[in-house]
């Protein structure tokens, strides 16, 4: 007889369909609804965006995406009020990102 040794036991990984179903349920439980912004909050966000654009200051951008609130740091490069878009450069990878203004939740200076 041979000893099996220490092996990791993953009880739910033996059935991939069940494992995927459990992961989806866990994701859905962690989702949050998109926060509603008041007029004052929207004006404050607009003021900070314009100031960050003109002074080239770094900002924290908090936005809503697929049931989650995500915060990134970066520099505002362009604001398109007609198309309701902003373009910002990500601080980590220095990539240009486009974002709709209606998904923004909060903007703060670093």
Image (tube, rainbow, N blue to C red):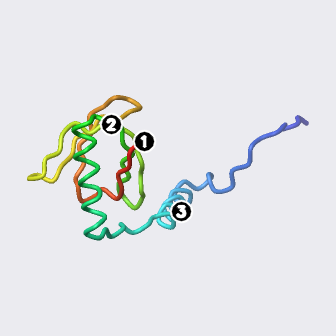
Is residue 65 visible to us here?
A: no
Which quarter of the figure is the C terminus placed in? top left
Q: In this rendering, would 105 be left or right of 47?
A: right
Image location of residue 47, percent across then percent down: 25, 53
Residue ID at (36%, 37%) = 58
Disc marking residue 62 = none
Would you place residue 41 above or below residue 92 in this image? Answer: below
Do callouts 2 and 1 mark residues in contact (Cβ within 8 Å)? yes
Determine contact: label 1, label 3, CB under 8 Å: no
Q: Which mark is residue 110?
A: 1
Image quarter hosting the N terminus: top right
The first of marks 2 and 3 along the sequence is 3
Q: Quadrant of residue 101?
A: bottom left
The number of numbered badges drawn on the structure is 3
For disc 3, the marked residue is 26
Asked which secondary structure carries label 3, the reply is helix
Q: Nearer the viewer, mark 2 or mark 3?
A: 2
Residue corresponding to mark 2: 57
- Packing grade of label 1 (10 A; few <14, some 14-19, many >=20) is few
As measured in the structure, the alpha-carbon distance from the residue carrying label 2 to the one carrying label 1 is 8 Å
Is residue 77 or residue 83 the one in the foreground?
77
Q: Which structural element holds mark 2? A: loop
Q: Nearer the viewer, residue 39 or 66?
A: 39
N-terminal label among 2 and 1: 2
Helix, strand or loop for disc 1: loop
Expressed as whole percent of the image width and height from the top left, the position of residue 17 reads 51, 58
């Amino acid at each position: 007889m041979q000893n099996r040794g220490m092996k990791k036991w993953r009880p739910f990984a033996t059935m991939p369909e069940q494992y995927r179903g459990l992961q989806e349920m866990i994701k859905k439980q962690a989702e949050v609804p998109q926060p509603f912004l008041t007029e004052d909050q929207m004006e404050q966000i607009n003021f900070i965006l314009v100031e960050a654009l003109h002074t080239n200051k770094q900002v924290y951008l908090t936005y809503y995406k697929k049931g989650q609130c995500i915060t990134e740091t970066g520099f505002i490069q362009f604001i398109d009020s007609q198309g309701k878009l902003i373009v910002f450069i990500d601080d980590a990878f220095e990539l240009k990102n486009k974002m709709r203004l209606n998904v923004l939740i909060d903007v703060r200076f670093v």
